[in-house]
Image (cartoon, helix red, strand yellow):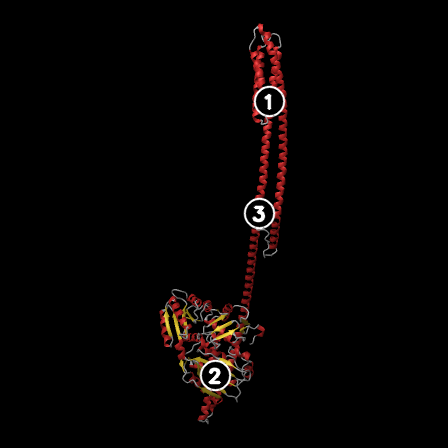
Amino acid sequence: MPFKKYFYLSLAAIAAVGVVYAGLALAVIAEAYKRVENGRLASDALVALQSAQVAAASLGHLTSRDGWPLTDLGTTTDFQRTVGESLKRAQDIHTDLALRDRAGLYATALLRDQVLAQTWARIDAIVSTPPTPAAIAEHRSALVPLLRSFTSELEASVVSEQALLAQKRLDADISLRLLAYLAGAAALVFILSSLIVAFLLKRRLDPSLASLEQGLERIRNGDFGNPVPMIRDDEFGRLAEILNFAATTLQESRLKERDARHVLEQTVEERTQELSRAIHDMQSLANQRSKLLAEFGHELRTPLTIIRGEAEVALRNNRLTKADYREILSIIQTVLVQLMVLLDDLTTISGEGDPTLRLSLAVHAPDPIVRATLQLLTKTRRGIEVDLRAADAQAMLDPLRLQQAILVLLENAIAYSPDDTRITVKSFGAAGFWHLEVVDRGIGIGEDEIASIFNRGYRSLQARASRPSGLGYGLGIAATLVERQGGHLSATSDGPGKGSKFSIPCRFCQETRRMIHVILIEDDLRIARFLKSGLEAEGLSVTHHATGGEGAIAARKIDSRLQRREIASAVIVLDLNLPDIYGLDLCRSLRRQGVTMPILMLTAMTDMRDKISALTGGADDYVTKPFAFEEVVVRIQNLARRGQPDSAPTGGDDLVIGRLRLSQAERDAFVDGRRLGLTSREFEVLSLLAARSGQVVSKERMEATLWGGYRPTASNIVNAHISHVRRKIGKGPNLPEIRALRGRGFVLDLAPPDQLAV
């Protein structure tokens, strides 16, 4: 029962008792008042009868005197009036009392009053009639017996009236005594009922109040887990529920505050560590630059010394033959080639932070470029086996940059191979790609160093032992140059001392052109015009749309054709500022609708936050205005190449790791049949890690492989994509997990960290 109802019922019970006793008291008071009033009337009747008795006695005494009734007439009249009025008053009182008294006590009194009245009437008639002197004796003889009878009857009435008055007084006393008893009993009952109600209320309140007190004490001591127990389902129960809810809310607020403080402290610590690392990196960079300049100075002295020496010998010696001059010039030419490589390396390294490395891309046959490169190494040509079988292949290349990359591979092969071993250079076409392989039988590469050899400034232990003066920048620069031309530089080795093989695959230009469909969404007609005409001149299929709405419709249609394999690849070139929708919002909308085509963002905004927002919002690449047209072409080709199923790192249709399945046909991943909805870039990140499951992939390797050979503009973009992929995969038994190994890279595996292969 609710406490409020219980309390009201208790008050109602007390009130009911009070009402009952009040009614009883009123009844007793009314009865006592009636009895007191009857006693007063009986007393008045007695007084009247006594007055009549006195007057009658006086009249009797008067009538016995001599000379009456001739004398004392006035006194007689007064006595007559007094007796008559007294009798009349007594009779009226008795009549009133007879009406009030249901016991019939005053019926006899009324009869006596009637008898007295009749007797008095006869006496009054006699007294009121004056006799003649002769009849006085007769007059007295008639009056005296009547007076005696009247006096006797009146005396009996007085005695009876006195008895009735005594009874009435006794009744009044009893009523008053009963009233006093009733008042005492009522007070006692009220006190007892109040005590009982108070006891019941206390018994009802004590557990609830004790529970609330204990709960509040727990809350004060910091215990917020439902501190107030629910004793009853009443108002106190609801109050306990409210207090528990308030305690839970307070606990959640404290937890959120603690988490926020922890996150803030962690963020401050991370930012402090990042700042410390940045300062350390800056110091290291300054030291590396000083060391680099010193090493380049040392490297430049040797070729310059050779050139100077050969030139001075040729000038001073007049007896040299034509063959001698040709040999000197050949030496100078070779040294100049080496010097050119050093200068190009220096130029590339100095522009490492600039992703817009200038290339002069055009359609070329790559095999002649390889032959021209080999001709620069005439002095060592006899140690190189050449097998070029892709004479008809053509690709979008920069001959000088490709030659520079090949020279790096050949120079490394020559420098790190014994003189009695041969170097093999061969090319061939396969599956729409032109392949170049440079195989040596030199110092080889350790398995744990394969992923790091393309990091600029890195040198393996074998390389440093074989050639201490190297810089470690050559392979990194070569990888950048190759990948900026749509290719990919990779290395394999059976281990230290077992040689190595470097491979360069580049897609055929004709096939790439035929497969790429470009959806250009740009509201500036001047930019759209030259982009469309230029891309079409490069053999790409371009459709232009000036608004985001039109572009979204076209993108969905092309993506459907892409999913049905009606076309091989497609790329969206999207401007950020469109008249009807913000480009980033359109990009996110397309990703939510399942459009997986690569998206290249074109915009004039250069702020780092805008770039990060675009790349994390679904874009795959980002170019700021003004831009070089050749750069846009290469980036579109790279995106198109990565957007094709046959270019996936795994090389197969499906790759299964535990409950995770990567589908190259659908370019998405599935967990127990549930589609993850990966963007194109996220799928490439996951595919690269899955292809080397259980092995560490460095951040630099991921940047080189997935961003076309140049570093992305946002330094933490790899971490952002890794975080998105982790969240979409989720956690659970038999699910692979992407782990970050500090200072080493990332690994995808089911095994615990202490069992990972490197």
Assign a secondary structure to mark 3: helix
The answer to whether residue 170 is seen in the rendering is: yes
Foreground tag (3 vs 2) = 3
Which quarter of the figure has residue 262? Answer: bottom right
Q: Residues within 10 Å of mark 1 (few under 14, many from 20)?
A: some
Marks 3 and 2, Cα distance to the nearest angstrom?
A: 92 Å
Q: Cβ–Cβ below 8 Å for labels 3 and 1?
A: no
Amino acid type shown at disc 1: Thr
Which residue bears the numbered disc 1? 108
The answer to whether residue 82 is seen in the rendering is: no
Q: Nearer the viewer, residue 557 or 292?
A: 557
Give the mark count: 3
Return the x and y of residue 661 as percentages of the image width and height.
50, 72
Assign a secondary structure to mark 1: helix
Q: Cβ–Cβ below 8 Å for labels 3 and 2?
A: no
Amino acid type shown at disc 3: Phe
Return the x and y of residue 731 as percentages of the image width and height.
53, 68
Return the x and y of residue 396 as percentages of the image width and height.
41, 79
Kindly identify the residue that appears in the image at 58 percent across and 56 percent down. 226
Q: Nearer the viewer, residue 623 or 100?
A: 100
| Quarter in which the C terminus is drawn | bottom right
Marks 3 and 1, Cα distance to the nearest angstrom?
A: 64 Å
Which residue bears the numbered disc 2? 437
Q: Nearer the viewer, residue 118 or 572?
A: 118
In terms of sequence position, does the residue under pointer 3 or pointer 1 come before the other?
A: 3
Foreground tag (2 vs 1) = 1
Q: Is residue 146 above or below residue 590?
A: above
Q: Which mark is residue 371?
A: none
Which residue bears the numbered disc 3? 3
In terms of sequence position, does the residue under pointer 3 or pointer 2 come before the other?
A: 3
